[in-house]
Image (cartoon, grey):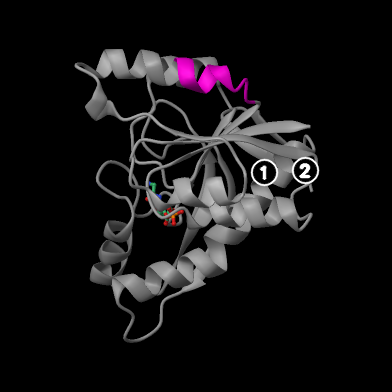
């Protein structure tokens, strides 16, 4: 049984996709042991409670220094003894000590086809604004392992989505979520739960 801990900051639609996939049997041999949010007002916390999953908030704003937050944050994560940490719209930088301790055990969903529209400053709606400003015709989403860089870790799954004439950032964001994010994030968890993903030579290999 893969024990997963989901980290969130906002609406939690990716968390919901994971909860639904576990309930509907699309993710198997997996238990969601907890949800942590950095934002006390994240609707994702409500989604966790409704599903009967333990949820807590730990915010950098409650600590005097970032080092203090990082220490308490790692302690909170460790308390769940997770096999896999899932960043589902989590917008806080992961402490280096956590990355080192959970090497290739942290995955992130990013709303673009990495290496396009990723790295520092590219998150949430900003990604879709940049894609529309550039005029690209294909966008998408990526699930990747988290390493010390920003969106630089080994890529596990990607899915492309077409841009349509007249798209706004909000419309495009919703289409990328529906057609890509809510599919590949649960799929990646299912693959990992069954030992079908490993990292070799700095790249993720998926054995389907
Ligand atoms: C999602 O689109 C996710 O890909 C993005 O934030 C949104 C969270 O939505 N993550 C990033 O931009 C990370 N760089 P949600 O809270 O409804 O799942």
Mark 1 element type = helix
Q: Which residue is mark 1?
A: 189
Image coordinates of residue 127 in percent, x first then y, are 32, 58
Residue 168 image point, x, y percent:
30, 77
**Structural distance between the alpha carbons of marks 1 and 2:** 13 Å
* Horizontal and vertical percent position of residue 163: 41, 77
Specify the quadrant of the image occupied by residue 62.
Answer: top left
Is the residue at mark 1 in contact range of ligand 1, meaning its CB lies under 8 Å from it?
no
Q: Main secondary structure of the magenta part?
A: helix
Mark yes or no: residue 168 visible.
Answer: yes
- Element carrying mark 2: loop
Residue numbers of the magenta segment = 75-82
Write down the residue under mark 2. 207
Q: Residue drawn 80% across and 39% down?
A: 29
Relative placement, left or right, of 37 versus 179 is left
- The answer to whether the residues at label 1 and label 2 have Cβ atoms under 8 Å apart is no
Asked if 176 appears above or below 84 in the picture, the reply is: below
């Amino acid at each position: 049984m893969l024990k997963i801990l989901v980290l969130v900051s906002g609406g939690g639609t990716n968390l919901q996709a994971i909860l639904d996939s576990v309930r509907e049997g699309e993710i198997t041999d997996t238990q969601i042991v907890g949800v942590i949010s950095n934002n006390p007002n994240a609707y994702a916390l409500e989604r966790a409670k409704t599903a009967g999953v333990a949820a807590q908030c730990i915010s950098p704003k409650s600590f005097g220094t970032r080092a203090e937050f990082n220490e308490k944050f790692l302690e909170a994560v460790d308390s769940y003894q997770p096999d896999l940490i899932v960043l589902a719209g989590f917008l806080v930088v992961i402490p280096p000590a956590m990355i080192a301790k959970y090497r290739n055990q942290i995955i992130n969903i990013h709303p673009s086809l990495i290496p396009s529209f990723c790295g520092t400053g590219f998150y949430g709606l900003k990604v879709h604004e940049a894609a529309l400003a550039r005029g690209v015709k294909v966008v998408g989403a990526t699930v990747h392992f988290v390493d010390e860089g920003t969106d630089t870790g080994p890529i596990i799954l990607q899915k492309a989505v077409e841009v349509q004439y007249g798209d706004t950032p909000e419309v495009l964001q919703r289409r990328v979520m529906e057609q890509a994010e809510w599919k590949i994030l649960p799929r990646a968890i299912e693959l990992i739960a069954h030992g079908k993903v490993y990292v070799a030579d700095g790249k993720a290999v998926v054995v389907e």
